[in-house]
Amino acid sequence: MGGVGRRRARRSERRPERRPDEERAVETKAPADPEPRGASKLWSTGFGQVATRSLQVLAVIAVAAVLIFIGARLTLVVIPVLIALVFAAAISPLVSWLRRRGVASILATWIALLALVAILVGVMWLVVLAVVNQWDELQSQALDGIDSLQSYVQDLPFQISSEQISSVRESATGLLQSSAVGSGAIAGVSQTANFVTGFFIMVVVLFFFLKDGPAIWEFLLRPFSGEAYDRGRRVGSATIQTLGNYVRGTAIIAVADAVGIGIGLAIVGVPLAIPLSVLVFLLAFIPLVGATLAGILAALVALVALGPVEALIVVAIVVGVNQLEGNFLQPVVMGRTLSLHPLVILIALTAGTVLVGITGAVLAVPIAASIWRAIQVWDGPDLPAKFARQKRAETV
């Protein structure tokens, strides 16, 4: 019996004593979750989780499709409101500056609104005077340039079939003669019922955005509180700032491109230099694609009027101006406003053009940039939403 007692004593010495907090943790340990059974077990597997996520994605796509369908049916209202929002974001600093200088709120709103309307009317008048009145000649020169290009490429070392050239010419002819370019984008500034109605809606909505924009946003945020309210304030401020910076920066770049390319065309002696410069200004509001279209059109006109050497010089001028703008002017003027990958820009341009035409191509990129900026401040001033956070360092 003595040996048994000594062995029990040695085992008790080797057994570690539990602290009171450990005993409480053992006593309060939560029971294990019961294993899912039946149908719930099917959804808890890896395949079931994929199916659940797929259903959620399909639901989001369905809601987005309904909203897009409604917006496409109500373009006469949706487009003027979006344009008014973009313009309000662009000139809101002027209204704020006037108010800080002691100007009454309503007077500051009217001054900014009338200044913007005067600028828009001046641009429309310039487009009608410089482009629409010479559009037939410009169109003829471009098509003749395609015919001249056909004769030049026949002696190239690689073969370009006449069918391919004819296909390109037919596509260009359809584009130059289409209502989207001839009457929708350029001649559309004439007094049509839809244009006048849309312009009137845009001006009225713009007035209220300039006068009561912050109050309208606060009204929309009334159902939210706490973190959701703070997020709404951040998203609203970031969206307006991005839209305003984009429009102001793009306008400055468009003017610089038009002046630079216009001076180059005038030095080379290309006819229709003023209409081409105006087109450069307008197409500069379509990122990536606009500058290319303007350069092709100017080169075709130079090819017909002057010859292949001058056409190549025009191409060099367009490329040089775009390189200077992209590498020096745009980083200074735009900053981080347009922090979108070129692939995203192309997708946004395509989607906007398909849905709304040229107006959609102009609005698609600033809207996409604003959405991305809102995602970047979703969880904090410098904290993107969880799904948009960088998971690992980028490699070059």
Image: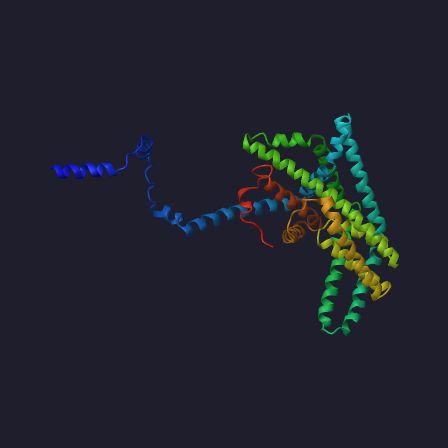
Which residue is nearer to you in this view: 391 or 386? 391
Q: Please tell me which residue is depicted at 79% across the width and 51% down the height of the picture.
A: 257
Establish if 228 lies above or below 44.
above
Is residue 246 toward the left or the right of residue 393 in the image?
right
Choose top left, top right, bottom left or bottom right for residue 97.
Answer: top right
Which residue is nearer to you in this view: 126 or 157? 157
Q: Is residue 23 visible?
A: yes
Which residue is nearer to you in this view: 81 or 325? 325
Establish if 119 lies above or below 297.
above
Quarter holding the N terminus is top left
Q: Which coloring applies here?
A: rainbow
Choose top left, top right, bottom left or bottom right for residue 246.
Answer: top right
Is residue 345 toward the left or the right of residue 91 in the image?
left
Is residue 64 toward the left or the right of residue 198 in the image?
left
Q: Please tell me which residue is depicted at 29% across the width and 34% down the height of the picture.
A: 18
Choose top left, top right, bottom left or bottom right for residue 175.
Answer: bottom right
Q: Is residue 178 visible?
A: no
Q: Measured from the top left, where is residue 79 in percent x and y?
A: 69, 43
Q: Measured from the top left, where is residue 243 in percent x and y?
A: 69, 41
Quarter holding the C terminus is bottom right
Q: Measured from the top left, where is residue 214 in percent x and y?
A: 67, 31
Q: Please tell me which residue is depicted at 58% across the width and 37% down the height of the picture.
A: 380
Numbered-mark total: 0
Q: Measured from the top left, where is residue 106 in percent x and y?
A: 75, 28
